[in-house]
Structures are given as C-alpha cells and as structure tokens.
Image (tube, rainbow, N blue to C red):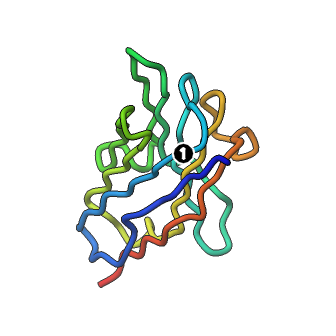
Amino acid sequence: QVQLVESGGGLVQPGGSLRLSCAASGRSFSGYWMAWFRQAPGKERELVASVDWHIGSISTYLADFVKGRFTISRDNAKNTAFLQMSTLKPEDTAVYLCAVGPYHSTDPGDYNYWGQGTQVTVSS
C-alpha cells in the first residue's frame, strides 16, 4: 500500500522558514516525480515544486511565485522529498500536499498518489 506522509508544517512569522518532508513508502518510485502542491481556502490546488526520482540525475521545477525562496530536494535512500521554505509570506498560508506521478505536470489530476497534507500558516 502506497503511503505519502508529510511533516514539518506549522505556524511561522512572516520572513521565517520551514522545512517540509514527504516520506514515501509501499513501492519503488524510481522514474516518478514527487511534487508539492498547496491549497488555500477557496482557492484551487496549485503546484509549488517538483523533483524527479531518476537515479543518477535530478530535475526540479519551482513555480515562479516561490523561486528564490523555496527549494526542493530528495533523499533517494530514504524515499523522502523535502521542501525548504524561506522568506515566508502570509500568502504562502495553505495546506501543503505531496503527490507522486509518472511525469512532471502542473495538473493535480496527473498525480497518482497523495498525502494527507500539512498546514502551513504564516502570520504575526
């Protein structure tokens, strides 16, 4: 059974940092992409960042609204992806969800597996 478990969310002040983790289990994800989406109340789910899972290479994607502030990385040995978030803004407040799919896509419908999400709140 495939499981994606997110952790690392919480309350942070504007300008602060958080590191999210997504631990995947239940199958091999070699060749897949792991992505971080976010969804704020009343808004559509949007892609924040993604990283591929090809052994020996790495490709990443960052949405324009997080470039220069967020980075995505992975640990193949632990089947875990990380989203390092810095210079957080109130508009970054959302539930952050990790997802796994066979290719990079901004469409949530293209991802096969989803975690439950972790809340990130940026507020003073």
Q: Is residue 71 left or right of residue 46?
A: left
Q: Is residue 38 left or right of residue 70?
A: right
Residue 112 at x, y = what percent? 71, 42
Q: Residue at x 40, y 68 (%)?
A: 9
Residue 82 at x, y = what percent? 37, 47
In the image, residue 54 sits, relative to residue 88, either above or below, namely above
In the image, residue 76 sits, relative to residue 96, either above or below, namely above
Q: Secondary structure at mark 1?
A: strand
- Front residue of 10/68: it is 10
Looking at the figure, which quarter contains the C terminus? Answer: bottom left
Residue 24 at x, y = what percent? 51, 46
Total tally of numbered discs in the picture:
1
Q: Residue at x 64, y 47 (%)?
A: 2
Instruction: Give the residue furthest to the bottom.
Output: 124
Q: Quadrant of residue 12?
A: bottom left
Q: Is residue 41 left or right of residue 109?
A: left
Instruction: Give the residue furthest to the top.
Output: 56
Give neighbour class at mark 1: few <14, some 14-19, many 20+ (Cα, 10 Å). Answer: some
Residue at mark 1: 25
> What is the three-letter code of the residue carrying label 1?
Ser
Instruction: Give the residue furthest to the right.
Output: 109
